[in-house]
Amino acid sequence: MKIKNYFYPKNLKEASLIFQENEESYYIAGGTYLNGLKNLKIQNLIDLSGLNLNYIQLEKNFLKIGSGAALQELVDSPIICQFLGGIISISALGCAALQLRNMATIGGALVTRGSWIDLACALLVLDAKLKIFPEDKIISLEDYLLDKKALKTGEIVIEIIIPCTSAGANFIKFKRTALDLAIINLATLIKLDNSICKEVKIALGGFTIPLRIKEAENILKSQVLSENLINSAAEKVGGSLKFISDFKVSADYRKDLAVILTKESLLLSWEKAKCN
């Protein structure tokens, strides 16, 4: 990779114009993902770090996070720490070591679609959406992760939008060491209407692109929850995915782990939902 030009645009329009006028261009904010890129043709870097996209705003109905917010800002922010039990802060903390969290941004992390992005699981159960420049179109994070063409060439993710809700949410990451990538990461959310499960979300990652397990969710939705029902949903998670073997663990181990951790997380989300 031989970088010929490094641009500091003054605004998003200028950034977009530079991208259009220069072939083999690449947007960066923290820049931590560059080392992992296999595209050696990149010649121009467009640095978005000076465009004031690192804000965190809690409004009446939405939490809005600028795509340039560093992962460590999510860990430290009182707003984020208090939002639904701190699920976003907890998941951001495990994404990388402190030095990388100080540089890597939420927008950059999500755009990579990496299975290692713990944060994506948490945001999936929170029904997060992405705001895209230049048309200010809104797409769900779930749709973005599943569709590689959701973000067109030259477009920029500028904001993550999360609806405020009263629910119980939980995140679990299973790993070998404190700074290891996840063997399994998962997030769950449960919203109750009296004793009825009004809303439930289960997201799994760590070995695959983070995704919702809707077959398992359907077992719990609109039902009076019980431990037996939660067991059934957890078993459905184990049967809904193709688990892989790698140098860390076997596919069977990962499958058993997914079932156990899903049950644990759902029970914790249920208890938290009762307190809301």
Image: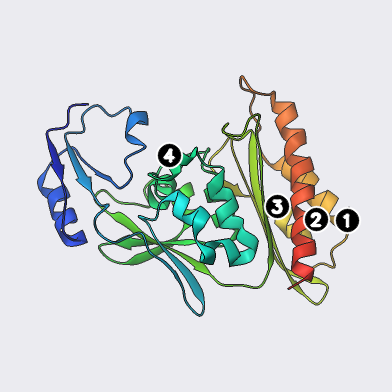
Which badge, 1 or 4, comes first in the chain's sequence?
A: 4
- Amino acid identity at mark 3: Glu
The image quadrant where one finds the N terminus is top left
Mark 1 — residue? 227
Mark 4 — residue? 100
Per the image, label 4 sits on a secondary structure element best described as helix
Residue 131 screen position, x and y as percent: 37, 63
Distance from Cα at disc 3 to Cα at disc 1: 18 Å
Q: How crowded is mark 2: few (under 14 residues within 10 Å), some or many (20 or more)?
A: many
Mark 2 — residue? 267
User: Is there CB contact under 8 Å for labels 4 and 2?
Assistant: no
Q: In this view, does 30 lie to the left or right of 185?
A: left
Q: Which of marks 1 and 4 is in front?
A: 4
The image shows a total of numbered marks equal to 4
Distance from Cα at disc 4 to Cα at disc 2: 32 Å
Which badge, 3 or 4, comes first in the chain's sequence?
A: 4
Distance from Cα at disc 1 to Cα at disc 4: 39 Å
Q: Residue at coordinates 30% horizontally, 47% vertically from top-left?
A: 29
- Amino acid identity at mark 4: Leu
